[in-house]
Image: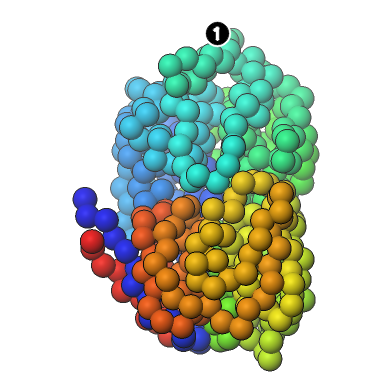
Amino acid sequence: MALEIFKIKGGTSLNGKVTVSGSKNAALPIIASTILSDGKSIIKSVPRLSDIEVLCSLMQSLGCKTNFQNDCVEIDSAVIDNPVGEYEIVRKMRASICILGPLLARCGRAQISMPGGCAIGYRPVDIHLRGLEAMGANIELKNGYIFAKAPSAGLKGANIFLGGAFGSSVLATANVLCAAVMAKGRTIIEYAACEPEITDLVDCLIKMGADIKGRGSPRLIIEGVKKLKPADHTVIPDRIEAGTFMASALATKGALEIQNCRCEDMMAVVDKLREMGAKMQCKKNSCLVAFDSKINPVDITTLPYPGFPTDLQAQFMIALALAKGNSVITEKIFPDRFMHVPELNRMGANLRKEGQSIIISGVKKLTAAPVMASDLRASAALVIAAIAAAGETIINRIYHIDRGYEKIETKLNAVGAKIQRLDV
């Protein structure tokens, strides 16, 4: 397969309307949760992304039938005869681990390769395994695989604390939640992730017949049920894509009306944009973000929801690199998530790493340079930088961006960008 690059002619501002796709981070655990039923589920507003296609392939390898057309995924999980997540599929995407809890609940056993994904730092799966073990699962790690088996009487409810070294875990919460909905008795999850993507999963599971209380809170109370029915669910908008467009409007001194956007899911982001001097107008399902006269320097610390999301750290770094003054971004979720920094410095940014923080001294402009994407969100940051920079930038290894942004160059070109996707 030929590698692709982006060739971006910079020095343009982004203006107009852009529409946000459904949330990848919500769609993945929701699609995996359909394993819990034995019929045909329909999940709508699913973005056409390589990560979604990887999960569909993984579901097929388990025995499910999947059909992905337009923005709708149909999953027939009547038969699951191979509860194994093979290395060749799982290595492509860390979120593949989200099949572990549903398989354990449905089949009583699961064998999953240790997951791969973006190189953004150490991300252990011990929280997932600890939660499942609390419900009686026997877990072994052998030859690069997780072997999980429920007791003969089935999983049982338990009180489970899911806090980790860097706060709560979205995927661990999803796994334990999916296992608990069919466990015997009551499960209480303390320090559950509160992200909107988990709330969306809870909404879908309730539609399937699950008994869950505490929606949107760090304390979820689940009463196990014997059987779940298939799902018919529409995924929430992608708040990270929305935030990426917001940062793009500011960094390129433009104005974007962002449609299919829920500002209530991203108030920490909206607050920082206002502090940075952006003109903001939030409506029910859209948001207007416009550059005013300058970008103000601010300090940002990434935190679990409802704090500022780690997945927007790199994109906001571009806008702050063009601010008038000094800013600090501190990464509290993935302390090593700074592989984009040297690439941005190649484009004229003035960034210095100090422990878990980046000290940003604003510059008047960025300039084009050949750069290389290291992970999904770093790719988005480099695209923003290239649009804002003077000259023509080549971005290598853009396969990362296709994991999380649907038709990114089509959307951005429609509002003023000049992006070409080329084979090399």
**Circle 1 crowding by C-alpha within 10 Å: few under 14, some 14–19, many from 20:** few
Residue type at numbered disc 1: Ser
Coloring scheme used: rainbow
Q: Position of residue 400 (x, y in %)?
A: 41, 54
| Residue nearest the viewer, comparing 244 with 5 | 5
Q: Quadrant of residue 137?
A: top right
Q: Is residue 396 above or below residue 291?
A: above
- The residue identified by callout 1 is 152
Q: Is residue 369 above or below residue 169?
A: below
Residue drawn 44% across and 76% down?
368
Q: Quadrant of residue 138?
A: top right
Q: Is residue 260 above or below residue 396?
A: below
Residue drawn 53% across and 66% down?
344
Q: Position of residue 118 (x, y in %)?
A: 48, 46
Residue drawn 39% across and 73% down?
393
| Residue nearest the viewer, comparing 343 with 244 | 343
Q: Position of residue 288 (x, y in %)?
A: 62, 82
Q: Position of residue 399 (x, y in %)?
A: 36, 55
**Is residue 262 visible to us here?**
no
| Residue nearest the viewer, comparing 340 with 81 | 340
Q: Quadrant of the C terminus?
A: bottom left
Helix, strand or loop for disc 1: loop
Q: Is residue 297 left or right of residue 182?
A: right
Residue drawn 69% across and 72% down?
361
View extreme (bottom): residue? 293
Q: How many marks?
A: 1
View extreme (top): residue? 152
**Is residue 153 visible to us here?**
yes
